[in-house]
Image (cartoon, rainbow, N blue to C red):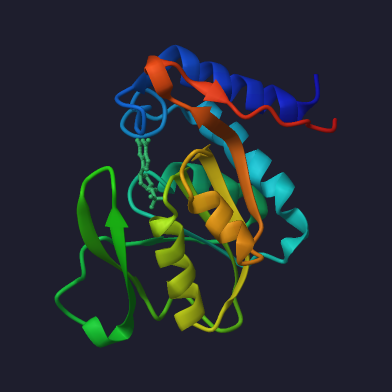
Amino acid sequence: MGREKELVELLKSKIVQDGKVLSDQVLKVDTFLNHQIDPPLMQAIGEEFAMRFKEGGITKILTLESSGIAPSMMAGLVLGVPVVFARKRKSLTLVDHLYTASVHSFTKGETNEVSVSKDFLKKEDTVLIIDDFLANGQAALGLLDLVEQAEAKVSGVGIVIEKGFQPGGEMIRKQGIRVESLAIIASLENGEVKFVEEAITE
Ligand code: 5GP
């Protein structure tokens, strides 16, 4: 089995074995991604993102605290670039030195202002956006907004788990942005995880 396929199969089996389907819309993966973190799995995920985006001329990875940090760190290590995480709480000082965007979280039912210091996103940067989940696309759109404000370039979006039955992936791909999702879920109905099966060339 090719290395890429191996990682994808490992991730899918982790999702099936350890994931908890909370509703038709929400999957909980607290045992390896969102609370407890599985370092070897994150390392393999980081290597996979780095491999898929290695031609992108990436100078920086941008993610959202806190669950995007672990996979981003590992990809940053392999690509040899810094990782910046957008903060969900605005610091009370230096507000005018921040790029900010609004992100509505459908899992939490709240809207957060996310922000990044102008020191860490520059016009010269080519940015890879990484996040744990892609659902309605609001988090990714917020991060894309921050990159746009900095007048930097976007190389693409790397997602650990995309829920393909929600509209975010299609919306972002339609904008001409490359989205690479390691596992794409077709449905969470009846408490069961079904994946979108995609041909992987080895
Ligand atoms: P979106 O902004 O695309 O609607 O949702 C993406 C964000 O919401 C991710 O940063 C992730 O933290 C959270 N999220 C969305 N769907 C799920 C889910 O099914 N499970 C978990 N654990 N987080 C999710």
Quadrant of residue 115 within the rendered picture? bottom left
Q: Residue placed at 41% from the left, 32% from the top?
A: 33
Quadrant containing the N terminus in the rendered view: top right
Quadrant of residue 124 within the rendered picture? bottom right
Q: Left or right: where does residue 50 sit relative to residue 127?
A: right
The picture places residue 165, in percent across and down from the top left corner, at 49, 38
Q: Left or right: where does residue 127 sit relative to residue 121?
A: right
From this view, report whether residue 54 is shown above or below residue 48: below
The picture places residue 169, in percent across and down from the top left corner, at 55, 50
Q: Quadrant of ligand 1?
A: top left
Asked whether 77 or 31 is in front, the reply is: 31
Q: Residue placed at 46% from the left, 43% from the top?
A: 166
Q: Residue placed at 43% from the left, 25% from the top?
A: 188
Asked whether 194 or 35 is in front, the reply is: 194
Asked whether 179 or 190 is in front, the reply is: 190
Residue pushed farthest top? 17
